[in-house]
Amino acid sequence: MEVFERNVYADLLSHEEWCNIITKKLQTSGFYLVETNIGPLSEDQMGFMGDHLKLQATVLLHERNQKQKLEFFAKSVPMKNKVFQEYVETIQAFKKEVGFFSSLLPDLKKYILKSKQTLDDEDNSSAHFWTCECYLSKPDIIVLEDLVALGFQHTDSRSPMDYDHCILMLQTLARYHAASVIFEQRRPKISTSGKACQIIDTYPHIFFETEWVTTEGHPGNRFMKASVKGMMSMLEHLPNYGRNYKNFHVICKKLPQTVEQMCEFVKPSTKFRNVVCHGDLWVNNIFFRYDESNTPIEARFVDFQLIRYNPPASEVMWFLHLVTRKHFRESNMDAFLTTYYQSFSSELLHHHFDADLLVSWSEFTESCNFYRNAGRMAAALYFQQCMMTGEYLKNVFSDPNHMTMFQLTDKSQYLIECYQNDPVFRERNAEVLEEMIEYCILNK
């Protein structure tokens, strides 16, 4: 007798919620809901902070008396893996993303749209959005626009981005960061001092750290320590700073406290102006749309479960170190930073603000130098996971015992296996780990 697995996602949305989602999508309530379906987007491990889902609905349009099929993308709290579910709920990552889409994003858009009504050129590139539309956001599920259905796609998750993709993404990122400044400048002041309000004060329920924390026993702290153990396991195999390096013992001693500096880097700066940062801009969280010649013409980013309030330079450095190789990045760094700041300044100017008075070029470049080591450390930490093959990740995360060991205890056995057997994993991880050692530990 054949046994059918129960669809654990079937009850996440009520009939009324389905209708509200479709009404927002079609901008009309003139339809009859014929059929709905909700299920996993893929059998592969698509995300690390929630389950990725595909929603389908068939409606009968009253006006034309014809059926139309609609598709949506959704994220839910982990439903099948209890260890995964407990981890996400404890660090409250899903809560952050729900808060972003339900309250912060509408406010950011509201102030941008309000100011754009006064602009002469409504078709200017600054009007391009930087994420997807949200149709429903509640504690256990977020329903979003399906970017793939709109022609967007990922680049290869284990390949570095080329120049054109980086430039387009930096322009998009600049507009996203500028939205925070516009919000804070246009929103009514919260004090009689005339000082612009800070987003972190307006949304304190969103801006808390989920990953890089020093609190003993916190899942984020346990994850960091498990990652350090993983780094230590790969150290002796490095081509330039391995077991035969004269100061190998110095590296081993300093590495744990060096990584712990991430807990300071992710805090709001008291020196540089802060903006809402995505906090997790690696390849799989970025989508691109292309023209007929396969040139990228639009970028969007998703997954806001790690948003932070940090200087723009913090995010720029993280992004560049997570998506490019060292030589390429250093060769093009001046062009990358200039492109970002020109787009940032242009966006503010369109809204009648002078960037030099809010985040000057000198402040931006100084902060980039300060946060460059944060980018180096982020790459060394992220690549432990991001550079694994999808099949390997699927095997690790499908077993609760392996997942607990990997996420919260000790990554060593998994990283060494990949380092020895996967040339891409080995090359990319050796490069970022050696760069972190060179600049953050040996200070060369």
Image: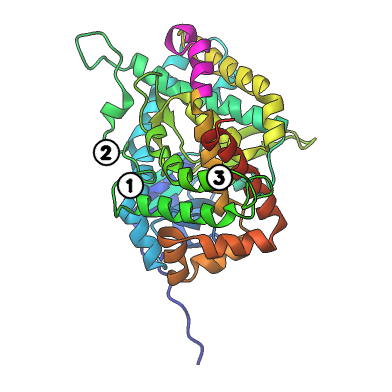
Mark 2 and mark 1 lie on one chain; the one further toward the N terminus is 1
Instruction: Work out which residue is located at the far bottom of the displayed protein and give it.
Output: 1
Q: Secondary structure at mark 3?
A: helix
Q: Are marks 3 and 1 in contact (CB under 8 Å)?
A: no
Please state which amino acid type lies under the numbered disc 1. Lys
Residue range in magenta is 354-369
On screen, residue 328 versus residue 231, left or right, reads right
Neighbourhood count class around disc 2 (C-alpha, 10 Å): few under 14, some 14–19, many 20 upward? few
Give yes or no for residue 358 being in the magenta stretch. yes
The quarter of the picture where residue 237 lies is bottom right
Q: Residue at x 42, y 38 (%)?
A: 262
Magenta region, mostly helix, strand or loop?
A: helix
Q: CA distance from mark 3 to mark 2?
A: 30 Å
Residue 97 sits in quarter: top left
Q: What is the CA distance from the residue labelled 3 to the residue labelled 1? A: 27 Å
Q: For residue 95, which numbered disc appears in the image?
A: 1
Mark 3: which amino acid?
Ala
Q: Is residue 126 above or below residue 131?
A: above
Residue at (50% x, 39% y) in the render = 132
Q: Which residue is mark 3?
A: 380
The answer to whether residue 140 shows anywhere in this view is no
Front residue of this view, candidates 62 and 421: 421
Q: How many marks?
A: 3
Q: Which residue position is annotated with label 2?
A: 205
